[in-house]
Image (cartoon, rainbow, N blue to C red):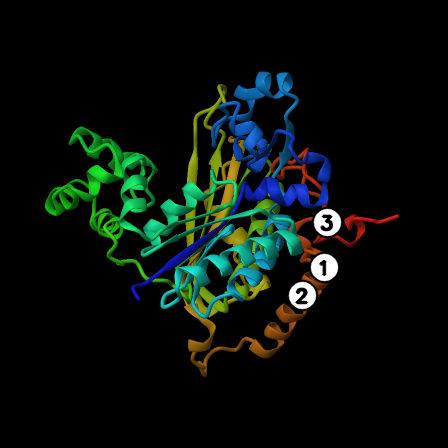
Amino acid sequence: MSKVFSLIDGNNFYVSCERIFNPSLENKPVIVLSSNDGCVIARSNEVKSLGIKMGEPYFKILPLVKTNNIKVLSANFALYGDISRRMMNIITSFAVKSEIYSIDECFLDFSDLEIQEITKISTEIRIRVKKWLGIPVSIGIGQTKTLAKLANQIAKRNSNGCHHLLTIRDIKYALASTLVKDIWGIGYKYASKLNDLKIYTANDLVNADDQLIRKNTNILGLKTTLELRGKSCIDLEEVADPKKSITVSRSFSRDIQEFEELSQAIAYFTARAAEKLRSSNQMTKSFSIFIQSNPFAKDSKAYSNSCNITLPYPTDSTPELLNNINKALIKIYHNDYSYKKAGILLYDLQAKSTKSIDLFDKRNIKRDTSLMNALDQINQNYGRRTIFIASTGISHSWLPKSNMKSDGYVSNWNEIVRVV
C-alpha cells in the first residue's frame, strides 16, 4: 500500500486549553491575545463567526468585544506548552513514526494500514485526547503530508472531526473547492503570483505546468504541487533538526531609559535563553544583544543597535553569559533614548556532546554543570524562577502586559485548581 499520513490538530488550541480549567468558557466567544495584549492569536468558533481575524489588533476590535461580550484572555504560554506536551505523548503512542510539527499539530505515519484500521485508530485518538485532556482534535488523512493537511482543514468542518483524502473522487472535490491561498506551503505572496497566472484553486495548481510553478514560486511550491497530485515529497521529520539559534526578546509594557533597568531586562532574557540552550543539549560561543527605541515616540528620533560578543569557549552557563552582558550593553546604550524593546540572540550553537577538552580552559566545568543542573531541576519541580540569579531582578514592571492571564494551573503550586 502507498504511504498514508495523518495530521492531528488541536482545535482552537489556546482557547481549548483555557476551557479545560474554566468550563464556564464553553460555547462562549473567547479570544487570546499576544504578548503585551497586542493582537488576537487564538479565537473560539463563536468569535470566528463574528468575522474577527487572526492577528487583528486588540484596540481595533474593542467595540465588537464589548457588544458581543467576548471573553478576553492574555496568553498563558506555560499552560499551553504543558498541555501540548501531554497531548503529543498521547498522540505519538498510536504510531511507530511521528513528527511533532507545532505546539498543536502532529503527523503520524499510517502507511501499510487498511483504511478501516486507520479510521478506527483516528476515532480512538479523538476519544482519548478529549477524555484524558479535554482537548478536541481534528484529524486529516492523506497519501501525502500536504493532502493530510488539506483533509484536516475539511475535518474541522465535519461533525465527526475526521476526514480522509484517499480516493480520486474525494481528492478532486477537495482540490476544486480549495483556494491556492489556503494551501499549506503556498502563502499569500505566491498565491498572488499564481492568481495572476489564472491559477485560483488547488485543482488549477495540480494541472499547471511544473516549470511555470517552479518559476513563479520555489522548490517548495513545486513539491507542494506534486504532493497534491499524490506523490509524497515531504517526509516525516522524526528527529527535530538541532536549533541554529535561540532568540529571546520582548517589547516592554512601558519605555525604559535607565541603564540598570535595561540591563536587568536583558539579563532576564539571557537567563531564559540559557535555559532553552540547556534543554536542547547545546552550547553557544557567540551571542548578540539588541536594543530598540520606541519607533512611535514623537519627541525623539528612532534608535536601534546591537553588539556581538564571541566567547573564548562554548558555554551553556547562565552566569558566564551574564558576565558579558553589560560589556556589550555599554557599547550601544545611549541615555538620551527611551527603549521599547530588547533581546538576545544566541548563535554559533553546537551540540554539547561534541565539545572537546581544551588544556588552556581554566573554567571549573564540572562545578558549573552541577550548578546549572540543580537550578534547572529545582525550577522544573517547583516553578520557573523559584531560584534565580540576582542580576535578573525580582520585580519586572517592564514585562509585557498580561493583565487578563489565567492562573498557572500547571506551573504554580499556589494556583492549582482546588476541588472543594
Amino acid type at mark 2: Leu
Residue plotted at (68% across, 58% down): 388
- The local secondary structure at tag 3 comes to loop
Amino acid type at mark 3: Tyr
- The local secondary structure at tag 2 comes to helix
Residue plotted at (53% across, 53% down): 325
- The x and y percentages for residue 156 are 47, 41
Q: Are marks 2 and 1 in contact (CB under 8 Å)?
A: yes
Q: Is residue 87 above or below residue 258?
A: below
- For residue 406, the mark is none
Residue plotted at (21% across, 40% down): 205
Q: Earlier in the sequence, mark 2 or mark 3?
A: 2
Question: What residue does disc 2 label?
Answer: 375
Q: Nearer the viewer, mark 2 or mark 3?
A: 3
Amino acid type at mark 1: Ile
Q: Nearer the viewer, residue 5 or 216?
A: 5
- Whole-number angstrom distance, CA of label 1 to CA of label 3: 20 Å
Question: What residue does disc 1 label?
Answer: 387
